[in-house]
Image (cartoon, grey):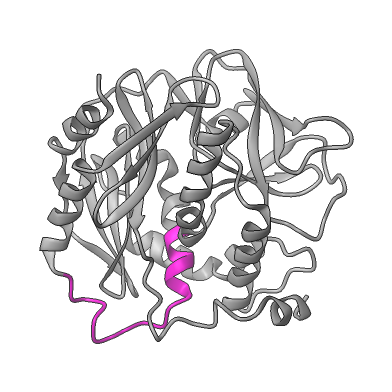
Amino acid sequence: MKKNKILKEYLKNITIGKRKQCKNLTIFPILYSSYNLSDYITLDEALNNELIEIEEIDESGIVSEINVTNKSQKNLLLFFGEELIGAKQNRIINITMLIGKQKAVRIPVSCVEAGRWESRSRKFGSDEILSPVFMRAKGIDELKRSAFKDRRYHLNQGRVWEDVDETLYSLDAYSFTSDLTEAYKKKELDFDYCLEALPYERGEAGAIFFINGILYGFEIFGNANIMKKIYDKLLKSYLIDASTYEEDEMNKDVIDLNIIYNLIDDVADSDIESYKGIDLGENIFIKGKIVKGLGFIYDDHILHLSSFPKEMKEEKNLKSRFASQRKRRNLF
């Protein structure tokens, strides 16, 4: 089936839920429940049940690649931006992928801990973190170029390190090794408050996110079951970005609903390029008039799609995210 048709079929069956808000982050749930994903297992499920092994390539290690062995009888679904901790340094997964049952695959990753290259453990674990939204949005064009060139799905490692430093700096978080997880620890109490204020809603398979009333992201998953499993990670990734903006009391509650419908139409009518996935399925890159994004399709179904405004707005009340690299480095 053509990729545009798959995407349009999904979007015509969604319903917009009741808005939810915590501080300057507003969410409109996407309700959808027509696709069964019982044959898939997520990263944290696999780790909790000892059904996955994640290791460095060898004793020397390679920053941009690691080995993943799916020991389960289900396909393993890994999401773009999920963080893996331990081994020689913490990494994030570069692209959403599906790894077949009982299969070992070398996957593309990026380092989010520039100041460490020594073993803390033989295997990787999970800290239940998804990288900040602005980092994922910046990576779309890089991944598209890499997919076109050699299908290796590599990100610009230097840019990733700069983004980690910017996140730490803007949240006044300290890390001797420039570790992204320290930014999340810094905001842990705020996360707990907003996770309680923005609970997962039954039937929620995606969401549209606004910060200070400005469109910030659109995420959909194969069905509500998958969204429920990754909900806390996803929400924290948007909360990290929201934390870098001062609350705009004048505009944070003012949202034109036409923006939502225009967004959905733009995604449905977007141009799509597809490339073979790391193992199973296909990765897609979308480009509309308003947004750009990337997603994953398997068996003629959308399993994940992230899309963001083409120009992520940098409002005048944005905290000092874009301080010079020299100044940021001097903090550590």
Give the vertical position of 184 relative to 92 (above or below): below
Q: How many marks?
A: 0
Is 23 on the left-hand or right-hand side of 174?
Answer: left
The image quarter in which residue 206 lies? top left
Q: Which residues are magenta?
A: 237-255
Give the vertical position of 180 relative to 35 (above or below): below
Provide residue 235's location: percent of width, then percent of height: 41, 56
Provide residue 241's location: percent of width, then percent of height: 46, 67
Out of 227 and 96, give the one closest to the viewer: 96
Look at the image and tell me whether residue 44 can be seen.
no
Q: Residue at x 56, y 35 (%)?
A: 149
The image quarter in which residue 254 lies? bottom left
Q: Quadrant of the C terminus?
A: bottom right
Is 269 on the left-hand or right-hand side of 275?
Answer: left
Q: Quadrant of the N terminus?
A: top left
Look at the image and tell me whether residue 208 can be seen.
yes
Give the vertical position of 167 relative to 10 (above or below): below
Out of 259 and 50, give the one closest to the viewer: 259
Provide residue 94's location: percent of width, then percent of height: 57, 42
Is 151 on the left-hand or right-hand side of 37?
Answer: right
Indicate whether residue 307 is drawn in magenta: no
Provide residue 242's location: percent of width, then percent of height: 42, 70
Q: Residue at x 16, y 51 (%)?
A: 17
Q: Residue at x 46, y 49 (%)?
A: 140
Out of 192 and 172, give the one closest to the viewer: 172
Most common secondary structure along the magenta stretch: loop
